[in-house]
Image (tube, helix red, strand yellow):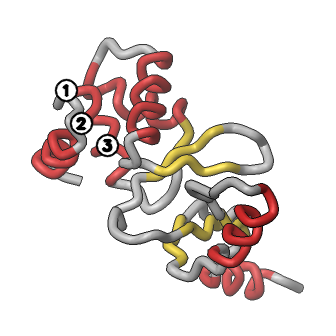
């Protein structure tokens, strides 16, 4: 992601355009995979100099709440983050547990479940998150070639 793009996104979300926010977005935008807060911190420290890990966590959480980045959940319970270029339309993600690549999943299939939950509870469902973890086709082919 170019600095102009991150600045435009931040302005659109009515967030102050700061070098730290931009650098975090640019760092995530250069990746095809998710990163942990520690990994983001290690990559941006040389460019920003003095930035603490708590600040990185705060900005990541702020950007996730604004919908700019997506939180990726894994079995190790660590939070990871991914800058999803697809900001239009409802979608979910497939996360490769081997290469860490994240792909959009356009199908949802949870509309009926949401309606059923709303009907049963007497309330309404306002949102849902679906993340599918697995091994991508490229990794499966690589693993299949290595099998005895």
* Residue appearing at x 48%, y 32% in the figure: 61
| Residue at (56, 55) in percent of width and height | 126
Above or below for 96 versus 60: below
- 101 and 142: which is toward the camera: 101
Say if 110 sits above or below 4 in the image: below
Q: Where is residue 50 in the image (x, y as percent from the top left)?
A: 32, 12
**In this rendering, is residue 25 above or below 99?**
above
Q: Where does residue 13 sit, x and y in percent of width and height?
A: 24, 42
Of callouts 3 and 1, the N-terminal one: 1
The residue sitting at the front extreme is 122
- How packed is label 2: few (under 14 Cα within 10 Å), some, or many (20 or more)? many
Tag 2 secondary structure: helix
Residue at (40, 59) in percent of width and height:
84
**Quarter occupied by residue 88:** bottom left
Q: Mark 3 and 2 residues: CB-CB less than 8 Å, in contact?
A: yes
Specify few, some or many for label 1: CA neighbours under 10 Å numbering under 14, 14-19, or 20 or more.
few
Element marked by disc 1:
loop
C-alpha span from label 3 to label 1 = 11 Å
The N terminus, quarter of image: bottom left
CB-based contact (under 8 Å), mark 3 and mark 1: no
Q: Is residue 81 left or right of residue 72?
A: left
Give the residue number, with chain letter if any, for mark 2: 22
Q: Name the residue under label 1.
A: 18
Question: In this orientation, which residue lies closer to the viewer: 21 or 49?
Answer: 21
Q: Mark 3 points at which residue?
A: 25
- Image location of residue 81, percent across then percent down: 51, 45
Disc 3 to disc 2, how far (Cα)? 5 Å
- Mark 3 crowdedness (10 Å alpha carbons): few <14, some 14-19, many ≥20: many
Check whether the beta carbons of the residues at disc 1 and disc 2 lie within 8 A of each other: yes
Where is the C terminus found, in terms of image quarters? bottom right
Q: In this view, does 12 lie to the left or right of 54?
A: left
């Amino acid at each position: 992601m170019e600095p102009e793009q991150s600045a435009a996104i931040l302005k659109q979300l009515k967030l102050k355009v700061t070098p730290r926010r931009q650098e975090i977005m640019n760092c995530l935008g250069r990746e095809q995979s998710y990163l942990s807060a520690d990994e983001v911190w290690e990559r941006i420290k040389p460019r920003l100099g003095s930035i603490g890990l708590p600040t990185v966590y705060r900005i990541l959480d702020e950007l996730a709440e604004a919908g700019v980045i997506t939180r990726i959940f894994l079995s190790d319970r660590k939070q990871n983050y991914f800058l999803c270029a697809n900001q239009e339309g409802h979608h979910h993600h497939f996360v490769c547990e081997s290469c860490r690549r994240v792909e959009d999943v356009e199908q949802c299939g949870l509309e009926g479940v949401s309606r059923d939950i709303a009907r049963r509870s007497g309330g309404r469902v306002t949102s849902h998150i679906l993340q599918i973890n697995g091994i991508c086709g490229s990794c499966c082919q690589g693993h299949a070639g290595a099998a005895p």
